[in-house]
Image: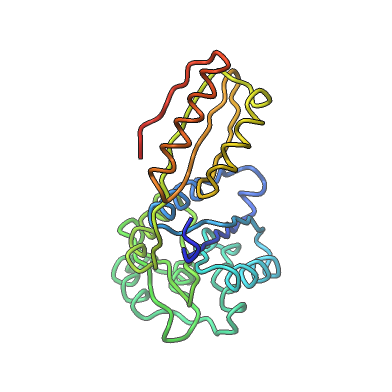
Amino acid sequence: MTEAAPTAAILIIGDEILSGRTQDANVSYIGQRLSTLGIRLQECRIVPDVPAAIVGALNALRTTYTYVFTTGGIGPTHDDITTDCIALAFERQVVRHPKVVAAMTAYFGDRLNDARLRMANVPDGPDVTLIDSALSIAPGYRIENVFVLAGVPSVAREMFESLAPTLQRGAAVHSQSVDGAVREGDIAAVLSRIQTEHPRVTIGSYPQERSTSIVARSTDKAEIAAVVAKVAQMMRDIGAEPVVGPAP
């Protein structure tokens, strides 16, 4: 892997995720997109709607990684406290962004109320920039290396694509899989040896009910091909027919 590659973390905010009532769909999308941009997703955290938990996690992550992406908690209800907490973490005041207020006034008209206006709140400072979405009148925003996104998956995806061109990129990470009717315990020793022989490749082993999927990830396509060939031959050697996924 490229040592200088930018890194990232995702901070998921919301009691509804921790309760199991809502299943998170943002990590998968953001993680895959970061990989294609050459940004290494290193950590994901889920925190409740508790100010101390949000501020503590955000401060830890933003000083550790190149980028932090938060999802959730920027809506109009009482438990949408993400912006208040981000302002607290950065020691900023909360203000209403005039551009967002104007857009919401034009959109909602007489239906605009204080609850909806909460979605125009951002931390103060000239470095705060909006992240637009075609699916929502209320934008996300960036403050330093933190990107604040909606929790609704479709809106979060739109916001991510809007901000993606601004990100520092590294070498893209590619992957290829090999599936076979083998047990992890039967291939562990040989797989460990292959990993040692190819330190530039991350090899993951994922057991299924009656098979195991081996996934090789690297910035080097030739290295991936070499690993895949060895894994496939290993499976053949113990009597399994490998199913090799598409080349990256």
User: Residue 91's spot in the image, x, y percent?
Assistant: 60, 84
Residue 172 left/right relative to 181 = left
Q: Is residue 79 left or right of residue 122?
A: right
Which residue occupies 39% across, 59% down? 160
Give the x, y percent position of residue 52.
70, 70
Q: Nearest the camera: 233 or 87?
A: 233
> Furthest residue to the top?
239
Q: Residue at x 43, y 55 (%)?
A: 34
In front of the other: 35 or 88: 35
Residue at the spot 32% in from the left edge and 68% down from the top edge? 109
**What percent of the width, then of the height, locates residue 237?**
55, 18
**Residue 239 appears in which quarter of the rendering?**
top right
* Residue 183 placement: quadrant: top right
In which quadrant is the C terminus drawn? top left
Vertical placement of residue 224 versus 82, above or below? above
Give how far across and how far down residue 103 sits, in percent: 31, 71
Of residues 157 and 174, which is closer to you in this image? Answer: 174
Quick check: can you spot residue 23? Answer: yes
Q: Is residue 96 above or below residue 187?
A: below
Q: Is 32 on the left-hand or right-hand side of 208?
A: left
Between residues 46 and 234, which one lies in front from this camera angle?
234
Model colouring:
rainbow
Residue 76 visible somewhere in the drawing: no
